[in-house]
């Protein structure tokens, strides 16, 4: 999804962010490690343009697509270039429509602050938005996350809940323009 | 997209504990081992057929349903919105398309606090049905040109059945009420011998219910017959997830029927209320769930009609939109009938 160079830059940036945020708890440390190696920040932490190119905006945490960033209509998905991504790497357009990276911070209104651990596991296992709704859309690699052990999923949840809450209401996913 | 869903399903199938846990009771491998039949094709007479007055839409499947309550045991009906079923209770629901049995779902209160969810896929000879993987079974029967019905996975079963205070959805005081809605969408006639609310009371199989349950039976409270039928439809097809007693975070939709209060909450939660889902061409935040007089600008009608992943409602259990329900809803909205 991202170039190797960009992925390395993101991982490095996130590692710095995690080092200061992780609590002295084995489960949270495990969750932080998983978030780093799974590249969750690649999409859930908005990127900004820095002096050396795109870099993760550490001030936003894993808050997903910025609420204030309204996207213009997506390009039509056709030809060998089938999908497109926003400069923030938080919005993606393709045959499925337009999907936006979710807010994974523990904000009670716009993130996962009110989720229980059981609900988080149910969401992953069902692969459904909020555990009840539409399928979680590409490019979220939900099938990879579903391969994680229950202990690792609980560690992920513990880590995400330990992070600072960021209020950011991510837009609802959109249908493909061709279906309108 | 399809590949992604299949991959997800395949991986889900490896998750442990989805049919009761490795150490707990498990669904048998064959439907014939669940207790539904006395002999091949012959239903055990202890299993009582019933027909809810508001059926769930399932791609137009014809359905038969049975319940077995353990000998001498009764439902605790003191909470009319959430009956408590005795351990050992079993439910079956058979789905048929084009006259052929496709799947039978099995819900079993195996032990206190443990309900087993299982689905069985019928063989080509229609002689036996086999337990499907926890991930479900995709594309088992064509329901329309190019559209195939899938047997849902266990987690999808729990998505609807695990939201309330009881896992049982179609066997309730409202669904069995003798005050049956003659305009219910896809309503099924009560056939001779089918179990009714009056039977349950008379046989002592429902205890602690309010004394006037049969004299003042459960009914959708609505201003007109169309609203009654539609709110009944919403209660069954939407109310398992959209309910304020167990809400989806950020949503205040409430379609469940409740015996409490003086009205149905559904209308107040949708009429002229803002929707988080923007209709095509409308700015985020400007769309409304239901606009009286304008079905084309009503998100509820748009999403009921959709079978595209980003907008389909209900999001699981069907690949085919319910055209009759949609036509009834659109006509009702166009007539401007809904009001707070």
Image (cartoon, grey):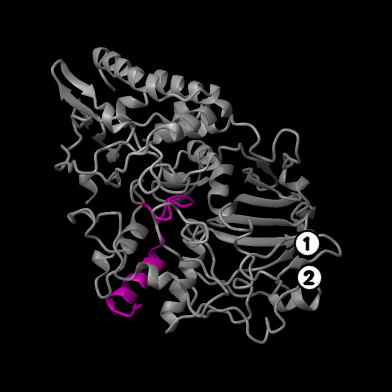
Label 1 marks a residue whose chain is: B
Q: Position of residue A158 (x, y in %)?
A: 50, 31
Image: magenta residue range: B312-340
Judged left or right of residue A45, residue B81 is right
| Disc 2, SS | loop
Distance from label 2 to label 1 (Cα)? Answer: 8 Å
Q: Answer whether labels 2 and 1 touch (C-beta < 8 Å).
A: yes
Do the residues indicated by labels 2 and 1 lie within the same chain of the protein? yes
Is B139 rendered above or below residue B66? above
Residue drawn at x 53%, y 39% is A117
Quadrant (top left/top right/bottom left/bottom right) for the N terminus of chain B: top left
Q: Position of residue A50 (x, y in %)?
A: 15, 21
Judged left or right of residue A107, residue B334 is left
Q: For this rendering, which residue is in front, A173 or B315?
A: A173
Q: State yes or no: residue B331 in magenta.
A: yes
Task: Say which residue label 1 marks.
Answer: B69
Is A161 rendered above or below residue B302? above
In this orientation, does residue B153 appear? no
Q: For this rendering, which residue is in front, B199 or B16?
A: B16
Residue drawn at x 42%, y 84% is B224
Quadrant (top left/top right/bottom left/bottom right) for the C terminus of chain B: bottom left
Is B127 rendered above or below residue A7? below
Residue density around tag 2, few if under 14, some if 14–19, many if 20 or more, within 10 Å: some
Residue drawn at x 72%, y 46% is B31
Label 2 or label 1, whichever comes before in sequence order: 1
Q: For this rendering, which residue is in front, B180 or B253?
A: B253
In this orientation, does residue B105 appear? yes
Label 2 marks a residue whose chain is: B
Task: Say which residue label 2 marks.
Answer: B205
Q: For this rendering, which residue is in front, A78 or B111?
A: B111
Label placed on residue B245: none
Is B246 rendered above or below residue A35? below
């Amino acid at each position: 999804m991202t170039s190797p160079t960009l992925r390395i830059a993101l991982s490095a940036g996130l590692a710095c962010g995690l080092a200061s945020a992780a609590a002295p708890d084995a489960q949270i440390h495990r969750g932080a490690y998983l978030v780093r190696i799974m590249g969750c920040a690649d999409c859930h932490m908005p990127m900004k343009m820095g002096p050396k190119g795109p870099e993760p905006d550490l001030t936003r945490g894993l808050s997903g697509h910025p609420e204030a960033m309204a996207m213009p209509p997506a390009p039509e998905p056709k030809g060998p270039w089938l999908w497109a991504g926003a400069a923030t790497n938080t919005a993606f357009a393709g045959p499925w429509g337009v999907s936006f990276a979710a807010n994974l911070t523990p904000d009670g209104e716009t993130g996962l602050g009110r989720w229980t651990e059981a609900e988080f596991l149910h969401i992953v296992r069902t692969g459904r938005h909020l555990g009840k709704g539409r399928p979680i859309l590409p490019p979220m690699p939900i099938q990879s996350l579903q391969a994680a052990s229950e202990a690792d999923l609980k560690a992920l949840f513990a880590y995400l809940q330990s992070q600072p809450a960021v209020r950011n209401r991510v837009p609802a996913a959109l249908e493909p323009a061709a279906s309108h | 997209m399809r590949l992604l869903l299949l991959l997800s399903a395949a991986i889900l199938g490896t998750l442990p504990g989805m049919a009761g846990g490795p150490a707990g009771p498990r669904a048998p491998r064959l439907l014939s081992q669940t207790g539904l039949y006395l002999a091949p094709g012959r239903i055990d007479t202890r299993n009582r057929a019933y027909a809810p007055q508001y059926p769930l839409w399932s791609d137009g499947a014809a359905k038969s349903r049975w319940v077995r309550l353990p000998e001498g045991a009764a439902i605790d009906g003191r909470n009319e919105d959430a009956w408590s079923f005795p351990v050992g209770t079993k439910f079956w629901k058979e789905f048929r398309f084009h006259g052929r049995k496709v799947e039978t779902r099995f819900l079993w209160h195996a032990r206190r606090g443990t309900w087993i969810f299982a689905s069985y896929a019928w063989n080509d000879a229609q002689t036996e049905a086999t337990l499907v993987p926890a991930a479900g079974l995709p594309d088992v029967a064509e329901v329309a040109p190019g559209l195939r019905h899938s047997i849902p996975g266990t987690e999808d079963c729990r998505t609807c059945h695990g939201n309330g205070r009881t896992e049982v959805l179609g066997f309730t005081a409202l669904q069995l009420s003798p005050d049956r809605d003659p305009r219910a969408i896809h309503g099924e006639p009560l056939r001779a011998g089918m179990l009714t609310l009056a039977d349950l009371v008379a046989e002592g199989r429902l205890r602690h219910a309010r004394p006037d349950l049969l004299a003042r039976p459960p009914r959708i409270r609505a201003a007109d017959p169309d609203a009654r039928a539609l709110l009944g439809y919403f209660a069954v097809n939407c109310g398992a997830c959209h309910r304020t007693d167990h809400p989806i975070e950020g949503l205040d939709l409430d379609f469940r029927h409740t015996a409490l209060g003086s009205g149905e909450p559904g209308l107040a939660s949708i009429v002229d209320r803002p929707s988080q889902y923007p209709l095509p061409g409308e700015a985020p935040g400007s769309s409304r769930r239901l606009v009286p007089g304008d079905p084309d600008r009503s998100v509820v009608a748009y999403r009921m009609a959709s079978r595209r992943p980003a907008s389909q409602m209900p999001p699981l259990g069907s690949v085919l939109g319910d055209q009759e329900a949609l036509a009834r809803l659109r006509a009702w909205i166009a007539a401007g009938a809904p009001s707070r």
